[in-house]
Image (cartoon, rainbow, N blue to C red):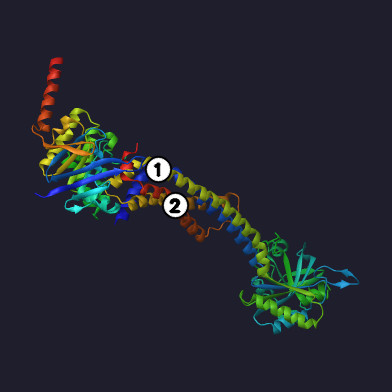
Amino acid sequence: MAAVVKIEEIHKIYDSGEVPVHAVRGVSLEIQRGEFVALMGASGSGKSTLMNLLGCLDRPTRGRYLLDDIDVSQLEKNQLADIRNQKLGFVFQGFNLLSRTTALENVELPMLYGARRSAREIRERALHSLEIVGLAERADHFPNQLSGGQQQRVAIARALVNSPEVLLADEPTGNLDSKTSVEVMGVFQKLNDQGITIVMVTHELDIARYCKRNLILRDGRLVRDELVPDRLVATEELRKLKEAEAAAKLTSA
Amino acid sequence: MRIVNTVKVSFRALRRNKMRSILTALGIIIGVGAVIAMVSIGNGAKAQIEAQVASLGQNVIIVFPGNFTSGGMRGGWGSASTLTADDADAIAREVANNAGVSVEVRDRQQVLANGLNWNTQVLGESPDYVDIRSWPVVEGAMFSDQDVRSMAKVAVIGKTIADQLFPNEDAVGQTIRIRNIPFKIVGILKGKGFNLMGQDQDDVVVIPYTSHMRRVSRRTNISSILVSSTSAEVIGKVQQDITDLLTQRRKGKEPDFTVRNQVEIAQTATAASETMTLLLGAIAGVSLIVGGIGIMNIMLVSVTERTREIGIRLAVGAHGKDVLLQFLIEAIILSSMGGILGVLIGIGSAQWVSYKVGWPVLISPMSVIVAVAFSAAVGVFFGFYPARKAAQLDPIDALRYE
C-alpha cells in the first residue's frame, strides 16, 4: 500500500521573535491509506505545528513532505490552497462554521473554490455529505440552531465534501462533552471503516484510544509510535453510556 | 467560473448583515442622490436660460449704433445716428450666409382700438423680422417688402395686444390706432412668453420700419439692425463680415457701431448658471466621497470582524485573490446599489422640487451614467484597501483569531 502521507526529516523553525523557536525538529513519518492516527503531545510539543504542516497551511523550513506522491514542501501559496481544497479536509476544535449561514451553505463552501461545478452538483454533493454524518434533515439550520456535536458533524461534512485523501482534525472533541465526543468519534470510526484516512490531534488519552495508531510528540520530536492495543468502539461505548444513564434513572426513581 | 461563485458569496455576506449594508449604502445613496438632484436643478435653470436666449431668434447678430460725441459731450450707446437703413441693405446684398436682415426702430406708444387703449412697444421692422426671431405669425400674414416700400399702414400684433384690445373677437382685419394713425392688423404673432429680463415679449406691435420712421416716430435714425446667419457655425464669420463691411462704408472714420451675436449674449447669461451647477455638483460630490469613506470604514471593520471567516475560506482552498475579489465585490455591490438607489432618489427629489417650488429641472442621462459609474468607482477605490488587507491574512493566524 502506498503511503498517502510521507514526511522525511521535517523541521520547522520560527524566527519571528528574538530567539528562533525550533518547533519541529526532524520528524519522519509515513501514514498509509485507511489509517486512523492520533497525534498526541503536551502543549508546546509541536503537535499543532506538525498539524499545520500536514495540513499544508504552513511550509516546513527543512525536509520533504509527499502528499499523495506530490512534493508539497516547496509549493507556493496558491498551489498549497489548491492542495488543501482537493486533497485535504479540515475539522477544527472550534468547529469554525460560518455564522448566519445554513449548514448546507457551510458544507458547500470548499466547492466554491475548487474545480468548476454546477450549482446543482454543488448542492447535491453537499446534501450527500450531510447525509453521511446524519444531518441531512438539518441542512437549512443555522449553526446557532445546532448543538455542539451537530455543529462538529457539519464541519466533518464540509471536510468530506471534496472527497479528500486525508481528513485532518485538530482537537475535534476539545469543545464537546464526553458523550458528544464519543458520538463524534463514532462518526470518525464509521468514515474510517469506509476507507477514509484520518489524522487527528488530541490530548485526551481516552479519545486517542478510538484511533488505530498513536503518535506521541515531545519537544518537536516523535517519541512514540504505536498501534492501539485495546481499541474502543464508539457504538459500543455509546451503548454502555446509555445503559448507565438508564440505570441512573432507575436507581433515582 | 469562480467569479460567479464569488459574487454569490458576496451577496450572501451582505444579506447576512442587512441593516449594516443598508446604512453603509446610505452614504452613497445620499451622495449620488444629491449629485443628481443638484445637477438636474442646475441644468434645468441653464436650459431655461438657454430657451429664453433662443427666443431671441435663430443665430441672431445685432448691429447697434455707436456713441455720438459732440463738442466734448458724449452720448451713450445708440446715440449716434449714423446707422441707416442703407447699411442694412448693404449687409443684405454683400454679406454671404445671411438668412435675413431687418431694420429695427423701437418706440413706446399709446395704441387704441375697439374703444380700449394700451401702452406698448411699437417696433418698426422689415418682413424678415419674423424669420430672424423664429416668431411665426399664427393668424394672417407678415407684411411684405412692398408694404415697407410704400410705408403701408399695416401692423402685426403680439398675443398680449390681441388679448388686451380684442378680448372677444378676431383681431385680424381690425384697425388699431397708433398716434391716431389707423393701422390695419394683418397678422397675429405666436405667443412667446417672457424674455431673460422678465419682460412680456408678446406685448408688441410690429409695423414696417418705414411707416414707423415717417408716420409714427418721425425719427431718422434706426435703433439697430438684426441679421441672422444661415447656421450657428458661420455666425462668427458673418459677424466679422458685417464689421468689415460697415467699417469699409465708414471710409476710415471711427467705427460708430457695435456688432454682437446671440452666442455672446447666451454665454454671458448661461455662465452664471453653469458656475452654480458646478458649485452644487461639487458640494454634492463631497458627500459622495464621504459616502465612499463610510464604505471603506465598514469594510475595514468587516474584515477584522470576519477574520475567522477569511481563515476558514483560506483553509478550505480559497486563494488570496478570491478573498480580495469577495471583499472588493461586496464594496462594489454596496456602492453601485447605493448609486442606483441614489439616482432614483435624486430624480424623485428633483421632480419633487420642480413640482413644489416650480423650478425647472432637467435630468440628463449623462449625469445619471456618470453618477452610477462614479459610485462603482468609489466602491473599487475605497474597497480595495480593506480587501487587500483581507487577502493578505495568513490562514493559520486568521483561524486562531479571537
Q: Is residue B321 above or below residue A193?
A: below
**Based on the displayed image, in which of its 4 quarters is residue B205 positioned?**
bottom right
Q: At 19% across and 40% down in the image, what residue appears?
A: A136
Q: Give the SS element for disc 1.
A: helix
Q: Classify residue B63 by image quadrant.
A: bottom right
Relative placement, left or right, of B285 versus B54 is: left
The x, y position of residue B249, in whole percent, is 78, 83
**How many other residues sit within 10 Å of disc 1, few (<14), some (14-19) or many (≥20)?**
some
Q: Chain of mark 1?
A: B
Q: CA distance from mark 1 to mark 2?
A: 15 Å
Q: Residue, x 48% and y 45% (percent of image)?
A: B294
On what subunit does the disc labeled 2 rest?
A: B
Discs 1, 2: same chain: yes
Q: Secondary structure at mark 2?
A: helix
Q: Nearer the viewer, residue A64 or B355?
A: A64
Q: Nearest the camera: B313 or B111?
A: B313
Relative to residue B156, is residue B46 drawn left or right? left
Kindly identify which numbered label has been placed on residue A54. Answer: none
Crowding near the residue tagged with mark 2, few <14, some 14–19, many ≥20 C-alpha atoms within 10 Å? many
* Residue B47 drawn at (x, y percent): 60, 61
Using residue B183 as the reference point, say whether residue B320 is left or right of it. Answer: left
Left or right for B218, reference A19: right
**What is the quadrant of the N terminus of chain B in the image?**
bottom left
- To which residue does mark 1 refer? B302
Of label 1 and label 2, which has the lower sequence position? Answer: 1
Residue A62's place in the image compared with B227, above or below, is: above
Name the amino acid, label 1. Ser
Q: Amino acid at mark 2?
A: Gly
In the rendering, which numbered label is found on residue B379? 2
Q: Is residue A207 above or below residue B179?
A: above
Viewer-closest of A133 and B90: A133
